[in-house]
Amino acid sequence: MRVALFITCFNDTLFPETGRAVLAVLERLGHTVDFPQEQTCCGQMHFNTGYRPDAVPLVARFARTFAEYDAVVTPSASCAGMVRDNHPVLAEKYGHPGLHQQVTEMGPRVHEFTEFLVDVLGVTDVGARFPHQVTYHPTCHSLRGLRLGDRPLRLLRAVEDIDLRELPAADSCCGFGGTFAVKNAETSAAMLTDKAQGVLSTGADVLCAADNSCLMHIGGGLSRQGCAVRTMHLAEILAATEGATR
């Protein structure tokens, strides 16, 4: 199986350690992973802000860049959802028939990281050890868009020596929502306050999620309160082997 990493422009720019963590986990499981240099943005920002025709060249570039791979893995539920759900919409309305066929065929080969581990590889124990108190925030795209269900939690529960704490009101939005946080700042801040209180109530020293965008938002709120809670992408925890004996 030929596997490619789609790191996303957000992660590549701000959180490259997440991509390295994905690579570490997949290589530990015996897979060779390619990183096509031609990849760029999936067009989600354009799509969400109304510049939909401008996203079509990015859709075409994605389809061309990853066409030869059996599986495309990304550590972003929102970008996976964009490719699978919205690329066909854009290609059909603004592209050409050939592009629509390409993206429709590619959609099932694009996997969010935890989907790929659990559904494609059939793995929940990836050989990680992370002796820390952790709570998990299911982001809106992972929970309501991709419907990841308990896949991330199944992976976390298999991590050696982890102390996994349940997050109160876990299914509530953190208030980020991309440009929502900018256009509706007061509402976003109120939602963030509730989410931060929930995180602090767990006593965890690490908050993880499947999307760095939400982690950036929540982490910013926590740091402004002077809290010591770290934010880590779930892939980083799965890549960790702190003092592992197995």
Image (cartoon, rainbow, N blue to C red):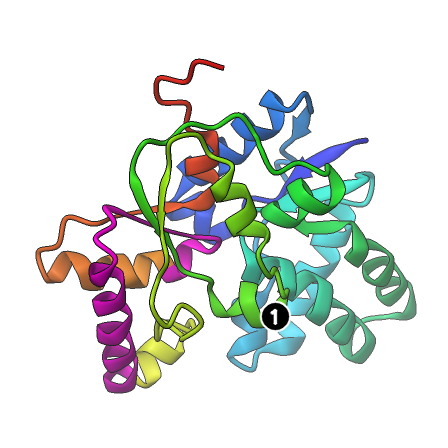
Residue bounds of the magenta highlight = 185-214
Task: Say what amino acid the circle numbered 1 marks.
Answer: Gly
Apparent side of residue 144 relative to residue 246 in the rendered image (left or right) = right
Residue furthest to the top in view is 245
Tell me which residue sits at (64%, 24%) in the image: 29
Q: Position of residue 225 (x, y in %)?
A: 10, 62
Apparent side of residue 171 relative to residue 31 in the rendered image (left or right) = left
Q: Position of residue 179 (x, y in %)?
A: 40, 76
Q: Is residue 85 visible?
A: yes
Q: Say few, some or many: other residues with alpha carbon within 10 Å of mark 1 (under 14 / 14 to 19 / 20 or more).
A: some
Q: Position of residue 133 (x, y in %)?
A: 29, 43
Tell me which residue sits at (65%, 40%) in the image: 117
| Position above or below: 179 against 111 | below
Q: Give the quarter of the image for residue 240.
A: top left
From the image, which quarter does the N terminus lie in? top right
Q: Which residue is mark 1?
A: 145
Q: Position of residue 160 (x, y in %)?
A: 43, 30
Q: Which element carries disc 1, helix, strand or loop?
A: helix
Tell me which residue sits at (21%, 49%) in the image: 229
Magenta segment, prevailing SS (helix, strand or loop): helix
Numbered marks: total:
1
Q: Is residue 8 visible?
A: no
Q: Is residue 204 magenta?
A: yes
Q: Is residue 1 magenta?
A: no
Q: Nearer the viewer, residue 60 or 155?
A: 155
| Position above or below: 28 against 215 | above
